[in-house]
Image: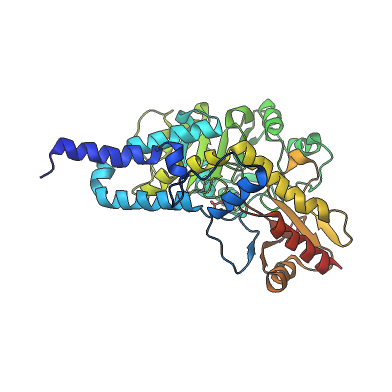
């Protein structure tokens, strides 16, 4: 029979080491060859494309909902599932917490904050709803957010309005701002002595518009107003440093641009704010400034937590800066060709720093839903229709596997429809 010490050693190898294998091993393809040599850009991105199992049925330009995972991460994920299933309760009672802590430390490095200010959640909704629902509201307090923010968070603000008598002030973000100051003043004009919390999208999900979050936070703090940032589309998409944003709370979904398996998110709460938030699920931790107070989840799929490390490994093969440049290049590749075409409206700012991989485009002669249907039916291009507030068009979200040839098909389709 295996001795206890041997067993523990094996368990340690299986659980502690597997999420942290050195990069070359993580990146090997089935043949065992090192697959990511220093290729020129075209060859490199074609190699990355081979990491994805792609359906031949359509060109997928709707990666914004879920950046499905590349094969190397999928292989590791299945290994994590098998390992957790084999070790079962023993895993849960021994190394589960320590492994999660290591993953959080690694993620904290990627997003630029302290591990004591970061927790893993299931998604952005859970992260931001924890703040909206757990904020110490008093009757008459005011909150500010935008019509272009994500619907579920707006719904939660409406709920706390009914529950606590909070007054919501709803602003509208222009698709083509003249300056950062224009955006800042839209929020600033709504601030009163009663304003407590503002929600700001780092990237507006329907247009891909990147807002000047640092400047908005500096302005809000000048009035003593806190800022909760919705960064659902930002982690793993472009370079950012949460500490430098000077925000109070930051939530994101890691199954979006970091390509972690479904059901993975994160929440940053700056140290001084941890004691004031009521957790979604109560924990017995007594230290008021321990972020663990906010991370009671009950039993949950711990293999998904482990997969965060594998997804970061894959991102490191690409390099975040290189990915950001590629995503912006792909977006500009198609949007620059469509901006001045009659009947076509690009709903995303033209300045490079105000967007990255996501943009939105509509045609004046067709409703967004019909445009999405036509793109799919006539041209085999899958997108999503957006039709509310000042945004009427299809959201276009390529991914690292997208080729310019696929975008040529899209540009041709749009020109044909518009004419
Ligand atoms: C801006 C924004 N916030 C929040 C969410 C919610 O993300 P999740 O469903 O992963 O919680 C989304 C989802 O698309 C989003 O785009």
Quadrant where the image shows the C terminus: bottom right
Residue name at image x 19 percent, y 40 percent: 7
Q: Camera-side residue: 29 or 170?
A: 29
Residue reaching furthest to the left: 1
Can the viewer see residue 105?
A: yes
Residue name at image x 82 percent, y 64 percent: 415
The image shows residue 11 at horizontal and vertical percentages of 25, 41
Asked if residue 399 lies left or right of residue 404, the reply is: left
Q: Quadrant of residue 220?
A: top right
Can the viewer see residue 201?
A: no
Count of labels shown? Answer: 0
Quadrant where the image shows the N terminus: top left
The image shows residue 307 at horizontal and vertical percentages of 43, 46
The image shows residue 304 at horizontal and vertical percentages of 41, 48
The image shows residue 356 at horizontal and vertical percentages of 70, 44
Asked if residue 210 lies left or right of residue 101, the reply is: right
């Amino acid at each position: 029979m295996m001795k206890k010490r041997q067993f523990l050693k094996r368990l340690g190898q299986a659980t502690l080491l597997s999420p942290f294998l050195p990069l070359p091993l993580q990146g090997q393809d089935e043949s065992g060859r090192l697959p990511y040599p220093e290729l020129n850009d075209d060859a490199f991105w074609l190699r990355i494309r081979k990491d994805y199992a792609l359906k031949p049925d359509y060109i997928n330009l709707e990666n914004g909902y879920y950046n499905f995972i590349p094969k190397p991460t999928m292989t590791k994920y299945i290994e994590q599932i098998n390992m957790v299933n084999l070790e079962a309760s023993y895993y849960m009672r021994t190394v589960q917490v320590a492994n999660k802590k290591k993953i959080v430390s690694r993620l904290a490095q990627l997003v630029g904050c302290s591990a004591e200010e970061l927790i893993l959640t299931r998604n952005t909704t859970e992260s931001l709803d924890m703040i909206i629902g757990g904020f110490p509201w008093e009757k008459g307090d005011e909150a500010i957010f935008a019509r272009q923010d994500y619907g579920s968070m707006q719904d939660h603000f409406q709920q706390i309005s009914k529950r606590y008598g909070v007054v919501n002030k709803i602003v509208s973000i222009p698709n083509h701002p003249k300056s950062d100051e224009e955006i800042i003043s839209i929020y600033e004009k709504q601030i009163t002595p009663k304003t407590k919390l503002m929600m700001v999208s780092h990237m507006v999900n329907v247009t891909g518009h990147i807002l000047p979050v640092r400047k908005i936070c500096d302005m809000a703090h000048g009035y003593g107003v806190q800022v909760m940032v919705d960064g659902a589309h930002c982690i793993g998409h472009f370079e950012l440093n949460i500490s430098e944003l000077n925000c109070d709370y930051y939530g994101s979904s890691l199954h979006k641009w970091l390509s972690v398996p479904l059901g993975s998110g994160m929440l940053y709460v700056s140290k001084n704010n941890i004691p004031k938030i009521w957790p979604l699920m109560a924990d017995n931790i007594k230290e008021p400034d321990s972020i663990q107070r906010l991370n009671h989840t009950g039993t949950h799929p711990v293999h998904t937590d482990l997969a965060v490390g594998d997804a970061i490994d894959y991102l490191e093969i690409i390099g975040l800066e290189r990915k950001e440049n590629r995503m912006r290049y792909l977006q500009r590749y198609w949007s620059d060709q469509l901006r001045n075409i009659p009947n076509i409206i690009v709903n995303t700012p033209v300045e490079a720093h105000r967007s990255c991989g996501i943009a939105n485009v509509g045609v004046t002669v067709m409703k967004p839903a019909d445009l999405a249907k036509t793109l799919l039916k006539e041209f085999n291009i899958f997108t999503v229709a957006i039709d509310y507030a000042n945004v009427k068009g299809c959201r276009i979200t390529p991914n690292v596997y997208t080729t310019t040839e696929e975008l040529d098909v899209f540009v041709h389709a749009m020109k044909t429809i518009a004419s």
